[in-house]
Structure formats: structure tokens, C-alpha cells
Amino acid sequence: MNDELIDTLNDLIETCKDGEEGFKTCAQDISDSQFKQSFLTRAAGCAAAAKELQALVIAHGGSPERKSSLSGTLHRRWVDIKSAIMGKDDEAILNECERGEDVAKKSYSRALEKDLPADVRAVVERQYQGVIQNHDLVKNLRDRARAAAHH
């Protein structure tokens, strides 16, 4: 069993769980129903990614992470506090979501710098593309919200 590999995968599982929680929180707080649906779809995608990574951990002889990380908990609290202060301003919520996806991008790019077995690399690369799409989607939504707010 490769401990470093298991740690790397478990770190990504936490990242996915954080994303799932983060997108769910944003979906609850955001006023625009179109955004809400996008976030729920993203949350489901993060949950599926976590399951796929958990299966890889087991396949490589490790025990998979089941929960989101402490940083995820902080991220969640921060979303809650921010939305309370901001009176649930969509642009502010989207900014927070984008920040969460920045963290996810960093976690995946760090993982891809490591020497990963081919089966693991294929999954991580595919998921990384999904994270980049999430990030770009959130950025586009935020820019739309910003434009709408400043008319």
C-alpha cells in the first residue's frame, strides 16, 4: 500500500465533500432559481467524484475519508456568516463559491504533480477538468449577477 497515494486521494475526497457542502449551502442561500439548480447539480457532481475516489482508495488498499475537512467546515461557517451579514446578496455568495473552487483547483493540481498510478491519474485528471468547469461556471454566474446588480 502506498501511504502517500492514499493521503493524496483522501485529501481530494475531503475537497469533493467540501465542494458538495459548499454548493448546497450556496444553493440554499441564493435567490436566483437558475443559479440554485446549477449549484445543486454541482453538489451532486462533487458527491459522485468523492464516491469514485473512495473506491480508488479501497482498490489501493487504504481506508477512505468519509467526511469533509476542517477547512471545509470553516468554509461553510464563512458562507453562513457572510450571507447573514450581506443580507444574502447573490454576488457575495458567488464570490464565496468561487473562492471554494479556487481551493479545489489547487488541491487537484497538487495531486497531479505527484507520481500517480495510471488508473488514479486518469480519474484525477478527468475530475480536475470538472473542477475547472465548476470554477468557470461560478465565475460566469458571478459576472452575470454583478452586471445585473449594477444596472
Image (tube, helix red, strand yellow):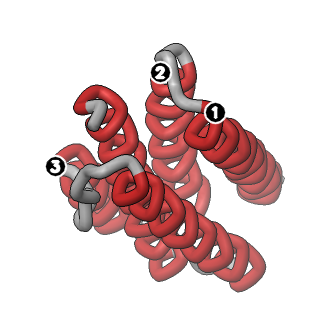
| Location of residue 56 with respect to 88 vertically, above or below | above
| Location of residue 150 with respect to 120 vertically, above or below | below
Among numbered discs 3 and 1, the one appearing first in the sequence: 3
Left or right for 56, reference 128: left
Q: Residue 119 placed where, x, y %?
A: 62, 42
Q: How many marks?
A: 3
Q: Quadrant of the N terminus?
A: top left
Q: CA distance from mark 2 to mark 1?
A: 16 Å
Residue at the spot 31% in from the left edge and 40% down from the top edge: 6
Left or right for 2, reference 42: left
Name the residue type under label 1. Ala
Nearest to the observer: residue 68 or residue 4: 4
Depth check, mark 2 against mark 1: the one in front is: 1
Residue 7: mark:
none
Q: Quadrant of the C terminus?
A: bottom right
Mark 3 nearby-residue class (10 Å; few <14, some 14–19, many ≥20):
few
Name the residue type under label 2. Arg
Quickly name the residue at label 3: 70
Q: CA distance from mark 3 to mark 2?
A: 19 Å
Q: Residue 50 placed where, x, y %?
A: 46, 62
Residue at the spot 50% in from the left edge and 71% down from the top edge: 47
Left or right for 88, reference 5: right
Q: Residue 101 placed where, x, y %?
A: 54, 43
Among numbered discs 2 and 1, the one appearing first in the sequence: 2
Name the residue type under label 3. Leu
Left or right for 126, reference 43: right
Nearest to the observer: residue 128 or residue 7: 7
Quickly name the residue at label 2: 110
Residue at the spot 45% in from the left edge and 31% down from the top edge: 107
Quickly name the residue at label 1: 118
- Is residue 3 visible in the rendered image? The answer is yes
Residue at the spot 53% in from the left edge and 32% down from the top edge: 108
